[in-house]
Image (spheres, rainbow, N blue to C red):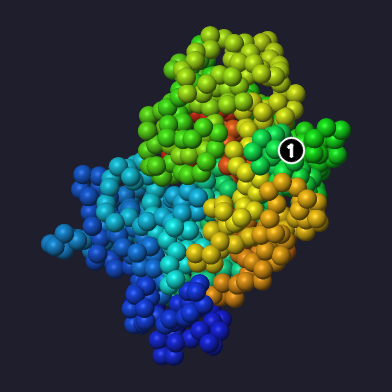
Amino acid sequence: MMISRRSVMRAVPVAALLGATGMAACSNDSGSSTTASGGASSAAAGAVELALNPAAWSYDADGDVYYQLGLSYVASPQDTSYETLGVFVPGAYMSATDNGDGTFTAEVASDGAVGDWTATTAPIVLPVNTPGYAAQQPPSEYSYDTVSAYMEAGFIYVQAGLRGKDSTTDAAPGNAPWGVTDLKAAVRYLRYNAAALPGNSEQTYVFGHSGGGAQSAVMGASGDSALYTPYLEALGAATTDADGATLSDAIAGAMCWCPITSLDAANAAYEWNMGQFATTGTREAGTWTEAYSKNLAAAYADHLNGLGLVDSDGNTLALEESADGQYLAGSYYDHMVAVVEQSLNGFLAATEFPYTPNTTEMAGMEAQGGSGGPAGGPGGSTGDASGLPSGAPGDGQAPDGAPTGEGTQGAPADGGPDGDGATAGAGGPGEGSSADSSESVTYETVEDYIAALNEDVEWVSYDSSTNTATITGLEGFVTSQKAATKDVGALDGVDRGQTENTVLGVGETAMHFSELSRDVIAANQDTYAALTDWSDEYGSSEYDSDFAQTDALGVDVLTREHMYNPMYFLSSAYEGAGTSTVAPNWRIRTGVTQGDTASTVEVNLALALQAAGQSVDFATIWGQGHTMAELTGTGEENFIAWVAEKAAS
């Protein structure tokens, strides 16, 4: 069956039509446009077949897995090397006949079961392994090791190729919002083929780390957003099923490790959370960037106070001016301090002493910062690097008083994160301490460990009768454990040199995207010009020039930033609030020491979701950086347990 005209388009402009083929034009970010039958990266003449072929299944008898690879999930792909997917299904869910040529004809076995799941109830999971908003390759070969945990759990595992910043070509851009657009198209494809595939497409979950965590968050917050419609149309994504019913790209849940989001205010958040406590490099006295850092930190207070965030009791969270530092007072500041305390106390409750931080926990990472993701991907093994010492851990429950989680805790962590951006290993003092995080140090008692944290400046007190710690405030914590690792302009670089400038650029051209940063520069440009290292190339006119440009679909960078900002769809401060279908289930984890972005990113996301009535399991993990951070158990184990809990409820 060839997909119909109405199945792949909705309200396509006349100029984008291709006459009898009924396909949207394939545009590229260089401003040109090709038809679906022209260009190496375009679809072949006519529509690509979107109906799954039931006679093309392969079968792994040893693992009892049916699978198909290379399935094109859009009718007019812009890059056929990325826009395909692989689907992997437990054998119990299929009734198949051997075709005699290595393939099988299979249909859903409605009575098939794996554990508590059946062929009609099993959840569907999609990894988003896109660190730094990179591209994700579709699977080119079958590997049981990659999918075994999910098959044994009774899940349907789908890996879709997704374009990213490193896949951009003139004909097939990978800038925002194409990565998430591809993911939305893949989810629509699964629903288009729901009759031929086992699993409950209404129980679809995505999971990722770093840029992948960010795109998972965007996917969860932006379900069915009209902002994505022209991009989906350009690809010929499925929009209705065979009966004409509208298809949705909304999902049931998102697992986000260290999501790099809220990019519109990320520069300001970084300086408020970390930069204001630094005095070297681009924050050295006398430089224009030092003044810019302080101005950004102050501007963050206005941004934060406009978000309308509340705590779990409905109390307004806000920042207030302080005698020292930039807005280090108010209910939001107190909340952030409580989050740090919760993280430390969760670690103390889960850890037996003597304690030796496992330095391999952060293997392959630069100390105090950097970007990147786990080598194995969110769905794969990350090695045997324990984040906790040997011996029985605590129950893993977070103490009362900060955002609460409701997920399942597992055994002591044995899957060490393996990306860039870590601080000290697994709970040891950070670089702010005189202790070298690369050395193996054993702490005989909790008191020894607390003393090491306080070696340079006292900021932690410990009550042995309750095994709990309190901290004096953010400055001591940041100086010891979470020092700024990026220059001022941490996400929207003053010279457009950050990863995110490329992500939100047009093709190979990096672009500014933060209106908040632009406004701070515009208000203080004369002052900055009199200070060291200033250049007119850093002026507000550069931002204005970028904001005026559009991509091939006529969409400007500020709109595309909104499309990659989950808060745009959640906070009443934005026009996008209430315009999407938000996933009901969320699990968010971050390493509390990460220097890649401010802790406010995950905290604000969790608060906004909680206020919206979503189910949110949120925690910051002590002693871990920009990783698939978990207090106990592995990311894979905990993700599977969480999905099982939510999909069954």
Q: Quadrant of residue 85?
A: bottom left
Identify the residue at horizontal 66%, vertical 18% (top origin): 456
Q: Nearer the viewer, residue 44 or 528?
A: 528
At mark 1, the secondary structure is loop
Let me know if residue 69 appears in the view.
yes
Is residue 376 found left or right of 211 in the rendered image?
left
Is residue 607 found left or right of 43 in the rendered image?
right
Task: Report crowding for label 1: few under 14, some 14 to 19, many 20 or more residues within 10 A (C-alpha).
Answer: some
**Residue 37, percent across and down?**
36, 82
Identify the residue at horizontal 57%, vertical 52% (top origin): 498
- Name the amino acid, label 1: Ala
Identify the residue at horizontal 56%, vertical 19% (top origin): 435
Identify the residue at horizontal 29%, vertical 56% (top origin): 140
Q: Nearer the viewer, residue 7 or 381?
A: 381
Let me know if residue 342 appears in the view.
no
Q: Quadrant of the C terminus?
A: top right
Q: Quadrant of residue 567?
A: bottom right
Q: Which residue is mark 1?
A: 285
**Residue 61, percent across and down?**
20, 48
